[in-house]
Image (cartoon, rainbow, N blue to C red):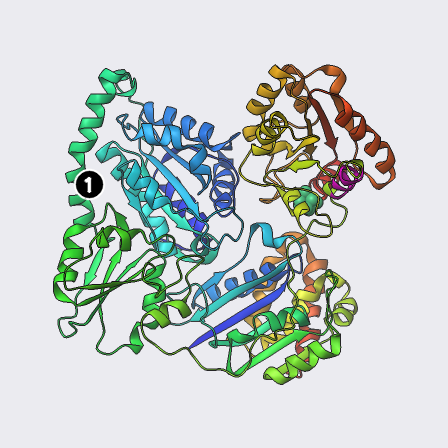
Amino acid sequence: MKQDIILAGVGGQGILTIANIIDYAAQISGLSFKQAEVHGMSQRGGAVHSHVRLSDEAIFSDLIPKRAADLMLSMEPLEALRYIDYLSEGGQIVASQNPYVNIPDYPDLDKVLDAIKQSGNHVIVDSEKLSREAGSSRSQNTVMLGAASGFMVLEEKILLQSIREFFKSKGERIIDMNIEAFRLGREAAGI
Amino acid sequence: MKNKLLLGDEAVALGAVHAGITAGYSYPGTPASEVMEYLIKASAGGGFNANWCVNEKVAYEEALGVSFAGKRALVSMKHVGLNVAADPFMNSSITRINGGLVVVVADDPGMHSSQNEQDTRYYAQFAQTICLEPSSHQEAYDMTRKAFDLSEYFHIPVVLRMVTRLAHSRSQIMEKPAREKNKTHRASGKDWTLLPVNARRRFASLMKEQEMLLKFSQGSPFNMLDLNKQNKKLGIIASGIGYNYVMENINELSPAPSVLKISAYPLPHGLIQELAGHVDNILVIEEGYPFIERNIKGLFGIKGKKISGKLDGLLPITGELNPDLARKAMGLASLQGRSSVPDWLPGRPPQLCKGCPHIDTLKALTKALETYPKAVVFSDIGCYTLGALPPYNAVDTCVCMGASVSMSKGGAEAGIYPSVGVIGDSTFIHSGITPLLDAASRDTNMTVLILDNSTVAMTGGQPTVATGEKLENIIRGLGVDLRHIRRIVPLKKNLEENVEVIKEEVKHPGLSVIISFRACIYEARKGKKGAEK
Ligand code: SF4
């Protein structure tokens, strides 16, 4: 059993948080994993992505080969397209529909969403709205994790355990809010 | 033995802790910063010393002092940091290293966050010492521990070469029991006083030792030859992280090629010969420069053998490797899929944060220089380098730490006016003080802007040694005319005022220093949180 996941977004959108939650969940599940992430210059509002590989066997490459990713989880529509050639035939896209506009030449949103729809199986989520429902626009990343969770090899209860662990130091309120965000995301994905 | 979840850099740091270090030293630099960040956290309970230093040379020399005392020390830096520390590094392979000294250098192939992609294996070869190159987190941990033993056994500094992909990848490792620290046992001064009479003796001894180093790498379990007697056609030499990309794809090759994994240098000649004796074609897959490939090819190659890799263009000679490039080089077709990246996709380059103090400084500077189309702004390494990109287009150079100040002096002396240097507080402390001393001694007609944001921002907000008043006192102490040390606060509302100050100092026909003082927004937030507590 193995699963390769590309996480995509813009620096500051909380990609590394999602990655850390998945890592820990993999650890509890007794899976091997490797997760390559981006630090330094590119984190300053630039495009960032992370390669997450889960397997019950040894994993060699930290990077996922092109056309091999089972899942593309993007915090932002445009960024989903940036790495779309990593997606395997039959791979699943889970993307937020809310653009992060910090460049002058951001294309027409409908064009971006259409391109995602043409790229494969997709779930597109209004993460902004759902995160506000959950109590804070800062929980968009957990909304997206929830939306993608049904496509993951990790069990829901283990992901929830990992979320609790990750936000432990921030207190009950933040934990509950993130769990709610996760639930709303999962629901929106229709799982 | 516990299973731990760590970044590659952190696996190195933990290896050092368990190897019984007495001290760790570093200067921040991507992709090496997390080594020291982990050490600082791990040292919180006492037991060993871990701290950021003013630059890599100082860090290295502090580590040398620890080694002299007979204790173990780790020094970590990014690849270009070793250029700064090259002086003590090169000489330390001649001193008789006493307590284990391990130099962790993280290369950045593909230049994710660097100005070049130099390969540290050349430095290790230059100093004629051992280099270990892990390919996995477990190896990063194990090799760091082993590196200390090797350093003490051969009395040389040992280089551990990391690359971005491993440094910034997270995985699990199995820890092993920690070892005790060394007791203090002073080195002999004769071996450490590199007067010609001693240095000649020590250099000869290092040369003699080379044979033993070769024996080590030849027998080291870090170098592994897996010979397939059934396949005489292809043998692959893979080093460090390149090995992962080979293994990712190897199951698709039949019959399987022989594979020589190299993770310990000097190059294991015997193993390479054994492989070469068995196959007609050798493919070298290594991250960084074609170091192994060039070494085994020499000037004339090996008669009757075809050696492929980066030199014959099978793999690109610049940039970072990945599993897809390895596939191609191994003769495998690329994987199929339907979607491709649209050609209309705009880039999203990194940019200065909203509210960043540099934005206001750069705007004021650009405005002040409006009437001087010939002005040159020599810049430096830090977040403000992003001021070279649109919409700012505010700076003209970025070469190496501190070069803004020295280049403005050279530029001014070559007739450039206005010649302006732009440098951050931590970069100034790292390598800007000495060139400013030089400029002050001649009162060169130039203007230096020191952007004091109170932190090492680009690499994640490590503490800086001198900011605010302390920084200003250093500048005063260098002999800069006190009337031409000015202070501005980079805020939108101060724009006109700041433009005036810059204009005045540009007009002054000698050296001026303008300190633009406002904390990085992340640093300011930290401060606020602290105040609330
Ligand atoms: S990290 Fe700080 S110094 Fe760097 S761009 Fe952001 S606000 Fe500016």
Q: Position of residue B146 (x, y in %)?
A: 28, 44
Q: Amino acid at mark 1?
A: Leu
Q: Residue furthest front?
A: B415
How many marks overall? 1
Residue at image x 75%, y 62%?
A104
Residue B286 seen anywhere in this rendered image of the structure: yes
Residue at image x 52%, y 47%?
B114
Position of B418 with respect to B271 (left or right) is right
B138 vs A191, nearest the viewer: B138
Asked if the residue at label 1 sits under 8 Å from ligand 1, the reply is no
| Pointer 1 chain | B
Position of A110 with respect to B193 (left or right) is right
Residue designated by label 1: B213
B99 vs A47, nearest the viewer: A47
Secondary structure at numbered mark 1: helix
Q: Range of the magenta residues?
A: B359-367
Give residue A163's quadrant in the image: bottom right
B170 vs B514, nearest the viewer: B514
Position of B341 with respect to B513 (left or right) is left
**Whereabouts is ligand 1, in terms of quadrant?**
top right
Query: What secondary structure do most residues of the magenta stretch adopt?
Result: helix
B444 vs B205, nearest the viewer: B444
Position of B354 with respect to B228 (left or right) is right
In this rendering, is residue B513 above or below B56? above
Q: Position of residue B459 (x, y in %)?
A: 58, 44
Q: Position of residue B63 (x, y in %)?
A: 40, 29
Residue B464 seen anywhere in this rendered image of the structure: no
